[in-house]
Amino acid sequence: MSLRTSVRRVIARLGGLPPHAHDVLLQCRSVGIDVRLRMPVVVYDPAHLRFGDHVDVGEFVMLRASGGLTIGSRVLIAAHAVITTRGHPEQPPRWLKVEDAPVTIEDDVWIGAGAVVLPGVTVGRGAIVGAGAVVTKSDEPFTVVGGVAAHVIRRIDATQ
């Protein structure tokens, strides 16, 4: 084991992260303070992933950042969620053809367990994405969305 690997593992333990989580974060474009990956978490193209401060990513989450993925501050992503910036064209042939579009998760967002956020979406500040929702279009700030495809369930009072 190299000295660099040993140092990474010690730093990861001190920070409360498993060694692999620390290695993933080191590959990201930017990482704020107190970013937690509750392994196992799968990250594709971490060089296109930006994390704000105080982010918690639950177990079995998949993040595909090839089109550019920005996750703001004070964000909670529950277990089994999928956030992807990559899809396939509607028109055939689809084999070996991909389309990337950026995804932005703004500050103070909570993404529920098993939710899916698709390419080109912005989840607005303070929004809640319900468990199992499939988000196909951008959400307004301070809304609760749910369903397949996700729709606004109610508004959140941002003044409290």
Image (cartoon, grey):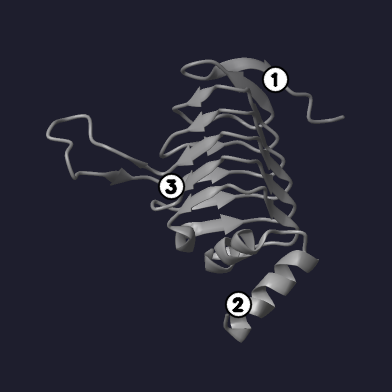
Mark 3 residue element: loop
Residue drawn 70% across the image and 53% down it: 36
Q: Earlier in the sequence, mark 1 or mark 2?
A: 2
- Residue extending farthest to the bottom is 3
In which quarter of the view is residue 136 placed?
Answer: top left
Question: In the image, is residue 1 above or below residue 68?
Answer: below
In-front residue for pair 39/29: 39
| Residue 142 at x, y percent in the picture | 69, 29
Q: Given this view, does label 1 or label 2 mark the residue nearer the observer?
A: 2
Mark 2 residue element: helix
Residue drawn 43% across the image and 34% down it: 118
Label 3 sits on residue:
102
Q: Given this view, does label 3 or label 1 mark the residue nearer the observer?
A: 3
Q: In the rendering, which numbered label is found on residue 5? A: 2
Mark 2 belongs to which amino acid?
A: Thr
Side of 135 relative to 55 (left or right): left
Mark 1 belongs to which amino acid?
A: Arg
Q: In the rendering, which numbered label is found on residue 155? A: 1
- Residue extending farthest to the front is 1
| Residue 45 at x, y percent in the picture | 43, 57
Side of 23 relative to 56 (left or right): left
Count neighbours of disc 1 (C-alpha within 10 A) and say few if under 14, some if 14 to 19, many if 20 or more: some
